[in-house]
Image (spheres, helix red, strand yellow):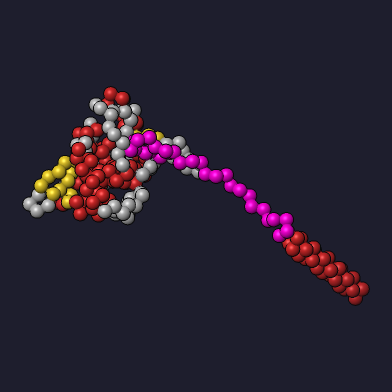
Amino acid sequence: MNPLRALSLLETRVLGVLVEKEKTVADTYPLSLNALALGCNQKNNRAPVLAATEGEVLAAMDELKAANWVIESSGARVTRYSHNIGRVLRVPEQSVALLAALMLRGPQTAAELRAATERLHRFADTSSVEAFLDELAQRSAANGGPLVILLPRRPGEREARWAHLLSGPVQVEGEPDEAVQVRPAPHALQPLENRLAALQAEVADLRAEVAALRARLDEVR
């Protein structure tokens, strides 16, 4: 299997939408260009959210067709498109579903992927998701190389996230900047110190008054 060229963000979005809509709106699949553009620009279940024009989507489709990722079919009145991911990558339906979720929503944990693929393929448990991910991550060079990668766990995260490699190597997000302790400028401290001294003096006066009242009470008794 020859190495595949890296896909653009819009190309992966197109493929993810085709996989998704094949399962969720089967009665209108294959998709028209208009439906495909709407799916690419959808605001829910997408990361990042795009604003691609039909012309841009069509240009991406032409590139995908040339590489056999997408199949074009002529309907009665409009041209329609379907994906060919399983055959191009030689992977099963379960793997296609996982790749589509990663292309649509970005890096996710195995548990998140199980939830994201609920309508595409129902995995029995998170372990079965991890098994398919491990298979995709360990593909040999003869089979085209790895298709997903497990990213380093970031500080504060309980689980590591997976990302697809169809767009080339993944740039790992940098470590968050260390927390900086904010200290007031020296000139801002003086009013606070003056206020503290005044409060301490007031407390001392109150204590003296209380002591004097107690002494008088003792005399009355």
- Name the residue: 32% across, 33% down: 147
Up/down of 90 relative to 19, above or below: above
- Name the residue: 90% across, 76% down: 220
Give how far across and how far down residue 121 sits, in percent.
Answer: 25, 42
- Name the residue: 22% across, 44% down: 61
**Residue furthest right in the image:** 219
Up/down of 205 relative to 33, above or below: below
Up/down of 194 relative to 1, above or below: below
- Name the residue: 88% across, 71% down: 212
In magenta stretch: residue 150? no
Give how far across and how far down residue 62 sits, in percent.
Answer: 20, 43
- What segment is highlighted magenta in the picture? 160-189
**Residue furthest top in the image:** 142
Q: Quadrant of residue 100?
A: top left
> Seen in the image, is 37 located left or right of residue 125?
left
Q: Quadrant of the C terminus?
A: bottom right
**Residue furthest bottom in the image:** 220
Q: Quadrant of residue 127?
A: top left
Depth check: give the residue in front, 139 or 213: 139
Give how far across and how far down residue 180 sits, in percent.
Answer: 61, 48
